[in-house]
Image (cartoon, grey):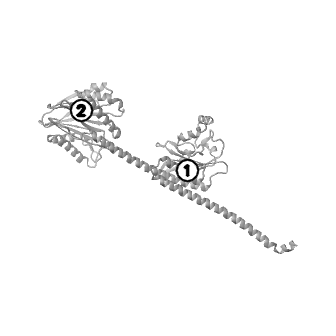
């Protein structure tokens, strides 16, 4: 009976069944597409969140470690990896140093046998080793990534040639994505993501997203490093300016009143910190000391050595009658603390009130110039002497001798550092000793201050736009 009823409608029922099957198939496919769309939307949202966090980190004052965590954790979340690591090149570009490794990250570099042995008795030894151990930048899977200069997908880390002597994770399957981190033409390091187990391979979409995220990370990391380097440079410049102000305080603020004499001095640093200095010392009992010195080299090291020399000389000069003996004591105290590639040239003079005799000792410094007013001539004053810091004392004491200069009214002594004669013009020609003698001869009759001002003015006219290559310091002593 049913057969008689169904038979006429059989084709229609079959068609309806086919349609129902098609509807179910389409609905399932639609659901899959919706799921894929939701996954893509979620991935896109995570990517936007990641880029937003990167942008905030670049302009913040947070530590580098904070930025490293944002990069590793952010990309790990975008790709849904099990582990992540960031290795950055050291300053020399020879080693890759671990900057951030998540807890689930397997070893991406070979682990020494002794560390493997330690792991058996002390779980966590491998993890500690990996977080501290830097590796050569041209070896292993990390080095291969740098050399390739592009993202790399490793389907089985245990089988990689980087671990030909044995993979510390055993035979478990680990899938790895690696990419070089670059900023412009500069290699910064390597980023890696990992997944553990079968059926967890990274898809081509994962690979494409990872490569893009690594490029953005390189841009962010490079800009953050530049931002921090600029801040550090500004801080260093500020510190140097403060140090320069302190150093200026160490220089005489005004010439002392010395009966029978006039004094004038000046110092123009070639950099923020000067290695030159001059000083006036009140030795008591109507005696006065004059010092001009030049530390080899430039910058902070020269400035520190200059301050040391000034302090030691001031302490040793008090009570010392003989300039050469004072310098021998200074040399003996400074020698152990002076680097082999540094030394100090120095002129030390002692004048007595009411006397025209000046006693001088020279420690390898440029000659002084003596203008004799009566004859209107200029003579070199160059007693023998060795620079401070070259010898521990035996040779220094034997070589260094005191000279006495008798000064008449109107005479002038000029002490200077080598930055005066070695000043250059725009064509590279040096100011030179002969030009200095001429300017000194013309200016000396006008007095100590006029002499220093005249030489400084001639140096400025001569140099023009030429660079100042060295510190310029002068000290003039005029006999009234």
Q: Residue at 15% x, 40% y: name it.
A: 447
Task: Please say whether residue 147 is visible from this viewpoint.
Answer: no
Residue 284: % across, % down? 20, 30
Q: Judge the density around disc 2: few (<14), some (14-19), many (≥20) Cα neighbours within 10 Å.
A: many
Q: Residue at 34% x, 44% y: name it.
A: 240
Q: List the residue tagged with mark 1.
A: 73
Q: Residue at 34% x, 34% y: name it.
A: 342
Q: Which of pointers 1 and 2 indicates the residue nearer the eye?
A: 1
Residue 194: % across, % down? 60, 48
Q: Residue at 83% x, 75% y: name it.
A: 8
Q: Secondary structure at mark 2?
A: strand
Residue 348: % across, % down? 24, 32
Q: Position of 238 compared to 83: left or right?
A: left
The disc placed on residue 358 is none
Task: Please say whether residue 294 is visible from this viewpoint.
Answer: yes
Closer to the camera, 126 or 408? 126
Q: Secondary structure at mark 1?
A: helix
The disc placed on residue 348 is 2
Quadrant placement of the N terminus: bottom right
């Amino acid at each position: 009976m049913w057969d008689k009823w169904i038979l006429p409608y059989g084709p229609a029922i079959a068609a309806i069944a086919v349609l129902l099957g098609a509807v179910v198939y389409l609905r399932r496919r639609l659901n899959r597409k919706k799921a894929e769309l939701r996954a893509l939307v979620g991935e896109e949202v995570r990517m936007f969140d990641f880029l937003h966090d990167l942008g905030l980190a670049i302009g913040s004052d947070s530590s580098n470690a904070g930025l490293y965590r944002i990069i590793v954790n952010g990309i790990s979340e975008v790709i849904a990896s099990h582990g992540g690591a960031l290795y950055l090149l050291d300053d020399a570009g020879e080693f890759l140093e671990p900057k951030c490794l998540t807890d689930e990250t397997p070893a991406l570099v070979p682990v020494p046998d002794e560390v493997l042995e330690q792991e058996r008795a002390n779980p966590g030894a491998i993890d500690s080793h990996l977080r501290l151990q830097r590796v050569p930048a041209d070896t292993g899977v990390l080095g291969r990534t740098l050399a390739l200069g592009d993202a790399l997908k490793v389907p089985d880390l245990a089988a990689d040639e980087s671990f030909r002597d044995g993979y510390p994770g055993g035979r478990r399957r680990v899938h790895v994505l690696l990419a070089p981190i670059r900023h412009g033409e500069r290699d910064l390091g390597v980023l890696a993501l990992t997944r553990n187990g079968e059926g967890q391979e990274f898809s081509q979409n994962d690979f494409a997203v990872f490569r893009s995220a690594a490029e953005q990370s390189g841009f962010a990391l490079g800009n953050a490093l530049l931002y921090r380097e600029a801040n550090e440079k500004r801080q260093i410049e500020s510190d140097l300016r403060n140090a320069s102000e302190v150093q200026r305080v160490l220089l005489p603020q005004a010439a002392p009143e010395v009966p029978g004499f006039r004094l004038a001095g000046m110092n123009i640093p070639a950099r923020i910190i000067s290695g030159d200095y001059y000083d006036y010392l009140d030795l008591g009992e109507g005696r006065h000391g004059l010092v001009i010195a030049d530390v080899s080299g430039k910058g902070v090291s020269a400035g520190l050595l200059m301050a040391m020399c000034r302090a030691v000389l001031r302490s040793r000069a008090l009570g010392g009658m003989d300039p050469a003996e004072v310098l021998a004591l200074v040399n003996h105290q400074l020698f152990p603390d002076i680097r082999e590639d540094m030394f100090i040239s120095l002129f030390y003079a002692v004048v007595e009130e009411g006397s025209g005799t000046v006693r001088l000792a020279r420690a390898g410094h440029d000659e002084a110039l003596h203008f004799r007013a009566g004859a209107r001539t200029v003579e070199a004053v160059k007693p023998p002497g060795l620079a401070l810091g070259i010898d521990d004392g035996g040779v220094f004491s034997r070589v260094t001798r005191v000279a006495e200069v008798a000064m008449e009214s109107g005479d002038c002594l000029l002490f200077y550092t080598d930055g005066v004669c070695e000043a250059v013009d725009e064509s590279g020609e040096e100011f030179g000793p002969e030009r200095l003698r001429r300017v000194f001869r013309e200016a000396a009759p006008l007095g100590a201050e006029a002499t220093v001002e005249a030489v400084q003015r001639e140096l400025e006219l001569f140099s023009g736009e030429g660079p100042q290559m060295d510190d310029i310091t002068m000290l003039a002593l005029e006999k009234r």
